[in-house]
Image (cartoon, rainbow, N blue to C red):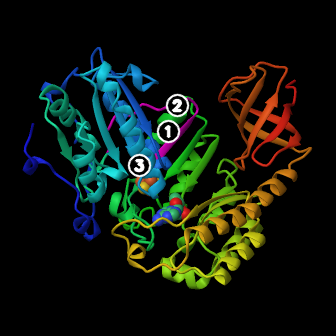
Amino acid sequence: MKVHEDWMKPSLKEAQKRTDQQAAIEKSLFNIPFEARNIGCGRKYFLRTYGCQANERDGETIAGILEELGFEQCHTPEEADFILLNTCAVRKNAEDKVLGELGSLKRLRKTNPDLLFGMCGCMAQEEEIVDTIIKKYPHVDLVFGTHNIHRLPILLYQAMMAREKTIEVYSKEGEVIENLPVKRFGTHKAWVNIMYGCDKFCTYCIVPYTRGKERSRTVEDILDEVRELKAEGFKEVTLLGQNVNSYGKDLQLVGGFAGLLEEVAKIGIPRIRFTTSHPWDFTDEMIDVIARYDNIMPFIHLPVQSGSNEILKIMGRRYTVEQYRTLFDKIVSKIPGVGFSTDIIVGFPNETDEQFQKTLELVDYCQFDNAFTFIYSPRAGTPAAAMADNVSLEVKQDRLNELMEHTNRYARLKNEAYAGRVVKVLVDGPSKKNERVYSGYTETNKLVNFTADQLIQPGDIVEVQITDVKTWSLDGEAIKSE
Ligand code: 5AD
Ligand code: SF4
């Protein structure tokens, strides 16, 4: 067993710092050291990813690395030789789920004494969590963070072959690494990172600390990836960044995200999506590009967080409700049929009932197609976590329920507008319950379950007539092709 001094644990203080230095783009940093070659041969891994799409995409990189080491993926923890949880730190309940899972999976050691446990992702970037893992979850053999995924081969070698408990978490982001392997989990839809990290520092949010400062990939590297995906038959790409609107600012790129989006659209892949957009720097050029290209999907995730100017100010969101509404209206007027989703937090420290009512007013105004609603969760090290809070959990829960009554009503209302219409659906595959029912998504990101007389393959884009609507999905029938 290694001594504690050899472990590299995360430091919040370090993670809070920002440098002006541009991140280097590394084309050959990832490699598999000789001793780690084939360490996975004859072994199986079970990977479970929590959280956002950035984490999902990291999961694909991790799976790619593990398979280059010879591991084979399995889909139940019972079959695995290596169990890895790729975690999310955005709210405490996400963390509790992981800790519960780590605790309950420990039993598998009894039947498989060589079983290796690992934890990575955003929770691994938290000082407190790593200390908890060391103290209370001694069966965890390997901890690594979001900034050193490329080190997995050697870390795994240490933990598995040299049998040393291995903890290595960088507190600061490093290079943009371009030669990491990837195992895509989708067959026709792919995630494409365009940038990493976040410099917005909303006062409630842990992401700027767990994922470091904003670093953009180059336009050419992104376009190459999209061209390759198109050549492989992928039908949809989702461009990923904690705030895609900031794309290119660190590289002093002229054109920014709008310019990149246009270049991606010109490649001609059938569907392009992007997430997440911050209302503060959503430009007119971006709206124009989305409106101009048929293959950029008319659906925008535009987190508002609160409908109260006072709360928005304390959250550090950099816009007012009036500015949000103006942006929202502009997008609606320029992009016909556009759909919106949003994120909303209730129960921010000291939120008054009046301030909460303002959030309901905003929801009534925007009538979002979909809203992700959360109770505020204090995150250690963020400015909001140090704020006194006079709102009880009971009140927060009541507010969440009331908010959800509104958001669900509008989700249904928005779906009702689709009754009888013909929509284009990118097919994911047959539904699990009934082979003759297929499912997929419209351009505006609505889930459609539909029947068809003709044979349909995942990845097809078919026209479907909507026959029935529900709150969270639409039902329909494929229109017969000639
Ligand atoms: N508590 C509750 N919700 C949060 N989010 C981010 N940080 C917190 C927090 N501390 C929500 C925001 C964000 C989404 C990804 O998660 O709404 O947009
Ligand atoms: Fe969770 Fe945020 Fe990390 Fe994504 S970036 S995994 S949402 S904490």
Q: Position of residue 408 (x, y in %)?
A: 75, 57
The residue under the point 66% across, 74% down is 327
Label whose residue precedes the other's in the sequence (3 or 1): 3
The residue under the point 29% across, 33% down is 117
Marks 2 & 1, CB-CB < 8 Å contact: yes
Q: Nearer the viewer, residue 450 or 462?
A: 450
Question: Which residue has dot 3 on it?
Answer: 220
Residue 40 lies in the magenta stretch: no
Q: Position of residue 64 (x, y in %)?
A: 36, 31
Q: Is residue 101 above or below residue 309?
A: above
Residue 182 lies in the magenta stretch: yes
Label whose residue precedes the other's in the sequence (3 or 2): 3
Mark drawn on residue 231:
2
Q: Which residues are magenta?
A: 178-193
| Secondary element at image label 2 | helix
| Secondary element at image label 3 | helix
Q: Is residue 10 above or below residue 37?
A: below
Assign the magenta stretch its main secondary structure.
loop
| Secondary element at image label 1 | helix
- Residue kind at label 2, given as amino acid type: Ala
- Residue kind at label 3, given as amino acid type: Glu
Q: CA distance from mark 3 to mark 1?
A: 10 Å
Marks 3 & 2, CB-CB < 8 Å contact: no
The residue under the point 9% across, 36% down is 1
Question: Which residue has dot 1 on it?
Answer: 227
- Residue kind at label 1, given as amino acid type: Arg
Q: Which image quadrant for residue 15?
A: bottom left
In this orientation, does residue 354 appear? yes
The residue under the point 29% across, 48% down is 145
